[in-house]
Image (cartoon, grey):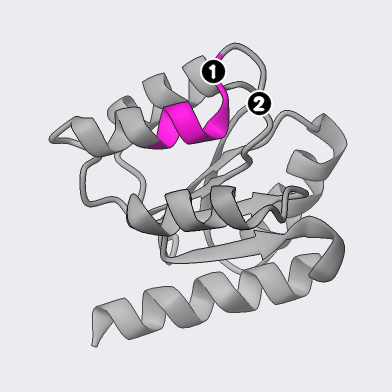
Amino acid sequence: MAKAKILLIEDDVMLAKMYERKFVSDGYEVVIAYDGLEGLEKATKEKPDLILLDIMLPKLDGLALFKKLRSQPVTFSTPVILLTNLGQEDVVFECFKLGAVDYLVKADVTPQQVVKKVESFLAEREK
């Protein structure tokens, strides 16, 4: 049985597949969405334990998607970690205002560090 279900919303297919391999090898179930609309649909249908969300997405950007997730009962309390190349303070502030549990800049973290962040967050949550 998987440790937890993670929804990865990332439009970079190679990067998404790399994260998927890393999480699956560490025992997680991973669902991938490649754009904001698909992410919204899968978040509602799959009910993940955690969402890793890119901000720059086609069809519906990550910030707009995050707002929609917070407005729906089924995803209102789902933890969201932002994984993006955007480091602007106003975007970071808005995301934390919406309840992001962390904000990671892709260029500053390795896939292993992302997995460790997710593991430590989920472990703390289970306490």
- Label 2 sits on what residue type? Leu
Residue at horizontal 34%, vertical 50%? 98
Circle 2 sits in a helix, a strand or a loop, which is it? Answer: loop
Query: Given the image, on which type of amino acid does mark 1 rest?
Result: Leu
In screen coordinates, is 79 left or right of 37?
Answer: left
Residue 25 vs 123, above or below: the answer is above
Q: Nearer the viewer, residue 114 or 24?
A: 114
Mark-to-mark CA distance, 2 and 1: 6 Å
* Quadrant position of residue 44: top left
Instruction: Tell me the residue at 13%/35% (across/down).
Output: 73
Image mark for residue 57: 2
Quarter of the N terminus within the rendering = bottom left
Compared to residue 15, the image places residue 62 above or below, namely: above
| Residue ranking furthest to the top | 59
Residue visible at 63% across and 41% down? 54
User: Image check: 76 left or right of 39?
Assistant: left
- Report x, y in % for residue 10: 67, 36
Whether 37 is among the magenta residues is no
Q: Which residue carries the number 1 mark?
A: 60
Query: Which span is picked out in magenta?
Result: 60-66
